Image: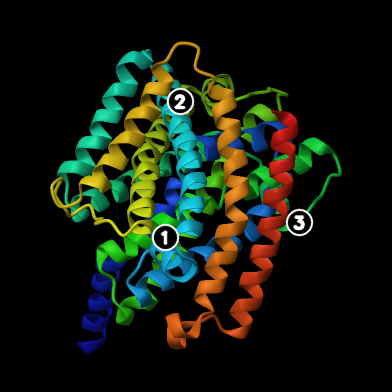
Amino acid sequence: MPFPRIRRRRVLLFLSTMGPGIITASVDQDAGGIATYSLAGAHYGTSLLWSLFFITISLAVVQEMGSRMGVVTGKGLAELIREVYGLRFTAGVMVVLVLANWANTVAEFAGVAAALEIFGVPRLLSVPAVAGLVAWLVIHGTYRLVERTFLLASAVYVVYVISGILARPAWGEVLRATVTPTFQLGTGYLTMLIALVGTTIAPWMQFYLQSSVVDKGIRVKEYPLARLDAYLGSLVAALIAFFIIVACAATLSVHGVRIETAADAALALEPFAGRYATVLFAVGLFNASAFAAAIVPLSTAYAVCEAFGWVTGVNRGLREAPGFFAIYLAVVGSGAAAILWPGAPLIEIMVASQVLNGILLPAVLLLMLRLINDRDLMGQYVNSPVFNLIAWSTAAVMIGLSLLLLVLSVRGA
C-alpha cells in the first residue's frame, strides 16, 4: 500500500534530520537548569508550573529561527554576524561569549563532581575522567557518532519523569497549577520566575544550534523537518523541567525542606520518595552535567572559528581544524581544572556566568532578528508578519527579564 510506505519514508527522513534541535534544547537542562527547577519546586511548590507554557513558546520561537538561518544560509550565526557587522564587532561579542561559556563549563563540571560524590566517587577521579571522555569523543569521533551519543544522553533525561512519578504528587493540584497563572510580588518569587526564563534560552544555544545544522548538512528542502526537530526539542525540554519541579514540589516543598543545589535536592528526596528517586535524580544530574560539559565548549569552538573564518567541524581532523579542536580542549581542560583547584571561587564563577549571559543574550536575540528579516540573506524565508510579532514579543520579554536578572545577580553578588 502506498500510504504506509510514504509515511515510513517520512519517518525515516525525519530520523535522519533530527538532532540539532533536540540536543540543544536537552543540553539546556544542564546543572544550572536542574538546580533552578529544583529550587522552584522545593521553595514555591507548583505555583510556577504555569510559566512553562510561555517559556516553551519562547524557546521554540528562538530555536526555530536559528535552525532556519542555518538551513537557508548554510552558515553559522557567528559567521553571519561577522559578514554583516564586521570583524571588530564580532570579536567583542566573542570575548563575552567565551568568558560566559567558560564559566558555564565550570558549573557543568561542578555538577559532575556533586552528582558522583553522592555515590562516593571523589571529584579528583570523576572530573578528570569525564573531561577526558568528552575530549576523546569530539576529537576522535565523527559528527554522526557524536550526534548519536548526544541523542542517547538526551534520552537519559527520562529519569526525571520517573522521579516525578515516584514522588506521587497530587495530580489534580498539578494540573490546576499548570493551567492557572498565579503571581506573587515577593522578590524571591520574581527572582525565581526570572531565573526560570533566563535558564531556558542561553546565548551559547543559538550559536551551537545553527552551527550544528550547518555541520550536519541539512538542506532547504529538509527545512520542515528541521523545524519539527526544533519544536520537538523545546517540548521535550519543557517536559523535563515540568517533572523536576513536580518531583521537588511533591516531596520537599510540602515538608518545608530548603535546598541550595540540585545535589541537595537529590539527597533530600530519599526520605519522601525513596532511594530509587534519589538515585535517578542523581543519575540525571550527572548525565546533564557531563552532556553540557561536552556541548558548551563545542559551541564555543564553533562560534570563535566561524567568527574569524577558521575551519570548523567535528568531521575534520586535528590537522585540518587545529584552531577548532584547540579551543574545544582549552575550554574543557580549564573548566575541569577550576573544579580541582583548591579554594576555587565556584559560586562567584557561576554568578559571573549568569551576569555574562544576561549581558550577551539581548544582543544575540536582536542580532538574530535583524539577520532573519534580511531578505537579501534569507529570501522567501524571512519571518512572516505574524511570526515576527511573536518573535519580537518574545525577544522584548526575554531582554527585559534578562536585564532584570542581570541587575538582581549583580546586587546578589
**Front: mark 1 or 3:** 1
What residue do we see at 82% from left, 49% from top? 183
On residue 404, the disc is none
- Above or below — where is 195 with respect to 7? above
Q: How many marks?
A: 3
Residue under numbered circle 1: 78
**Disc on the earlier residue, 2 or 3:** 2
Q: Does residue 156 appear in this view?
A: no
Dividing the picture into quadrants, the one containing residue 332 is top left
**Front: mark 2 or 3:** 2
**Front: mark 1 or 2:** 1
**SS for tag 1?**
helix
* Drawn side of residue 304 relative to residue 354, left or right: left
Dividing the picture into quadrants, the one containing residue 35 is top right
Residue under numbered circle 2: 110
Dividing the picture into quadrants, the one containing residue 67 is bottom left
What residue do we see at 66% from left, 57% from top? 398
Amino acid bearing label 2: Ala
**Disc on the earlier residue, 1 or 3:** 1
* Drawn side of residue 17 relative to residue 226, left or right: left
* Drawn side of residue 225 relative to residue 135, left or right: right
- Above or below — where is 135 with respect to 252? below
